[in-house]
Amino acid sequence: MTDDDRDFIERAESASEKTHGEPIDIDQLAENFALYGLEKRVAAMESFDNELRGEIDSSPHSLRRRVQLMALRRKMGGVHEALRKAKR
């Protein structure tokens, strides 16, 4: 299996574009995250956190993408916390 050097958002956009004909936006990613079960949400967030710990370069695209990833992580964390409080 080859290494996929794309980030989480790029992989999700690609998958969405293949199935629906258009890339998914960050808000829709966070909404879809709410449909995951507890264990899958935890695993996804751990994977996402590992990705955010990776190195970034100073190119405008890389910095912009890092900001998008951090915003998505914040939304996912909020969704996860709300679902945990609701015992889901």
Image (spheres, rainbow, N blue to C red):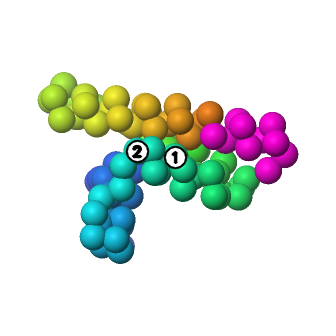
Marks 2/1 in contact by CB < 8 Å: the verdict is yes
- Identify the residue at image location x=25%, y=28%: 63
Q: CA distance from mark 2 to mark 1?
A: 6 Å
Give the image location of residue 39, x and y in percent: 71, 55
Three-letter amino acid code of the residue under disc 1:
Ala
Q: Residues within 10 Å of mark 2 (few under 14, many from 20)?
A: some
Where does the N terminus fall, quadrant-wise?
Answer: bottom left
From the viewer's perspective, tell me whether residue 76 is left or right of residue 53: right
Q: Which residue is mark 2?
A: 26
Residue designated by label 1: 30
User: Residue 50, which numbered label?
Assistant: none
From the top left corner, tell me how far across and down residue 71 is, in percent: 43, 31
Name the element at disc 1: helix
Query: Label 1 neighbourhood size at 10 Å, few (<14), some (14-19), many (20+)?
Result: some
**Which residue is rendered at x = 34% and y = 71% of the image?**
20
What main secondary structure does the magenta stretch of the protein show? helix
Residue found 43% across the figure and 31% down from its top: 70
Question: Picture quarter containing residue 57?
Answer: top left
Q: Which residues are magenta?
A: 79-88
In reply to whether residue 82 is colored magenta, the answer given is: yes
Task: Give residue 14's position: percent from left, percent from top.
Answer: 30, 63
45 vs 35: above or below: above
Secondary element at tag 2:
helix
The residue lying furthest to the top in this view is 58
Does 72 sit left or right of 15 as displayed?
right
Q: Is residue 85 magenta?
A: yes
Q: Residue 29: image x %, image y %?
A: 46, 51
Instruction: Answer yes or no: is residue 47 visible.
Output: no
Relative placement, left or right, of 73 versus 88 is: left
Q: Is residue 10 at least partly visible in the picture?
A: yes
